[in-house]
Amino acid sequence: MTSVLLHNFGCRVNQAEAFAWAEEFQRRGLRLERDLARSDLIVVNTCALTSRAEGDVRRFLRRIARVNPAARLVLTGCSVALDPAGYQAWPQVRLVVPNADKETLADRVLDLVGTGPAGPAAPFRSRALVKIQDGCDFRCAFCVIPSVRGAGRSLPAAEVASRVRRFADEGFAEIVLAGVSLASYGTDLTPRTSLLDLLRRLDGEADGLRLRLSSLDPRFLTDELADFLAAGRSLCRHFHLSVQSGSDAVLARMGRGTSAGRCATLLARLAESAPGAALGADLLVGFPGETEEEFERTRRFVEASPLTYLHVFPFSPRPGTPAAGLPQLEPGVAKRRSSVLRALGRDKNLAFRRSFLGREADGVVVRCGSGRGEVLTPNYIKVRVTGPLPDAKSRVRVRITGATPAGTEGYLCAP
């Protein structure tokens, strides 16, 4: 039986794609492998969001050449889309699949290696992922994703509901709904619909299942949707917004079509409506022309916000984007500013986790083995636990006993 290792870089959408491939591979006779050195075939889903992400991809490919020079490689994803010929020339590469053809990747891989009888299925992830939207119709000045992912495309609601029910029947306690521009879900469908309409439908059918959302664009996050996110019975209280900056001037130069004030209002609304929710934000620092005062506005925005964690990215010019042609800041400026925000994010996250000391929470086992494991709560606290654990993807209850900069500790409560 051919063994295959799936390795992802980047976003939840990439993870959802790999989740679907893993299911298809196992159904048609391939065996999932975790060990790089023992894999016959390695599928790499790449990312081009930043230059660092592209560098990580190339370092991983060089590692494969050292550790497993006999493995066959299949490459896909956004970094590959920027340089398909260059990636095709890498040693060991047998197949390069464009983003537009990802739906056929499993078939093309199986044509390459052959099929066989289905073996024992091994869950690829402890939580199921469903890609419900792909592509983007916006053209933010810094972002290459629309040019490599294409226009926005949504999965019909009936198909989303069918997949969610199937994963629930397979025993998954949590399902992640992912999209490149998730909050714009449904605007391309006929008849036109919305993420709010979809969540209302799923909320009525979930019956104890938890649904977690990937990143949300404030431009599509209406007050009505925000209120439903806080009230929906099946929705994890974990909301991540692509804020990018706390300076209106920087947001305008980025072409974001929103304001810092609107983002602050949304975050405050979610924090008030869903006490204890995890609130995250993407922030891009060092954008061309960003002054110290503009950065300071972002720092003050974060400091005053109810955010509980941050994803901070130093700006790096992406080929073909308007921002790549603008005068760049001095080397090291973005790195320094990133360090400031990351430190602030760590402090806010530690305070958030400490606010739950002594409290119990439901969670899903996301990692287990050797007497230790990790449980993920609905509000995105990763709790390290010791002792016997049920299988990954099982629902459990934990008591949180410790929170330090290194992580959160707890123990399983009696069933």
Image (cartoon, grey):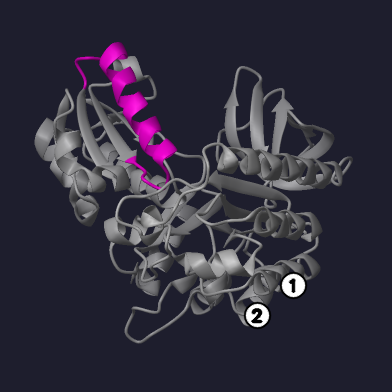
Three-letter amino acid code of the residue under disc 2: Asp
Report the front residue among 290 and 306.
Answer: 290
Q: Residue at x 29, y 46 (%)?
A: 77
Inspect the magenta stretch and tell me whether residue 49 lies in it.
yes
Q: Position of residue 308 (x, y in %)?
A: 73, 51
Q: Residue at x 82, y 38 (%)?
A: 400
Three-letter amino acid code of the residue under disc 1: Arg
Where residue 269 is drawn, which disc sits there?
1
Figure check: 248 above or below 285? below
Q: Are marks 1 and 2 in contact (CB under 8 Å)?
A: yes
Figure check: 276 above or below 206? above
Q: CA distance from mark 1 to mark 2?
A: 8 Å
Where residue 223 is drawn, which disc sits there?
2
The N terminus - image quarter: top left
Q: Is residue 266 left or right of residue 410?
A: left
Query: Which region of the structure is painted magenta?
Result: 46-71
Q: Is residue 247 left or right of residue 404?
A: left
Report the front residue among 103 and 313.
Answer: 313
Magenta region, main secondary structure: helix
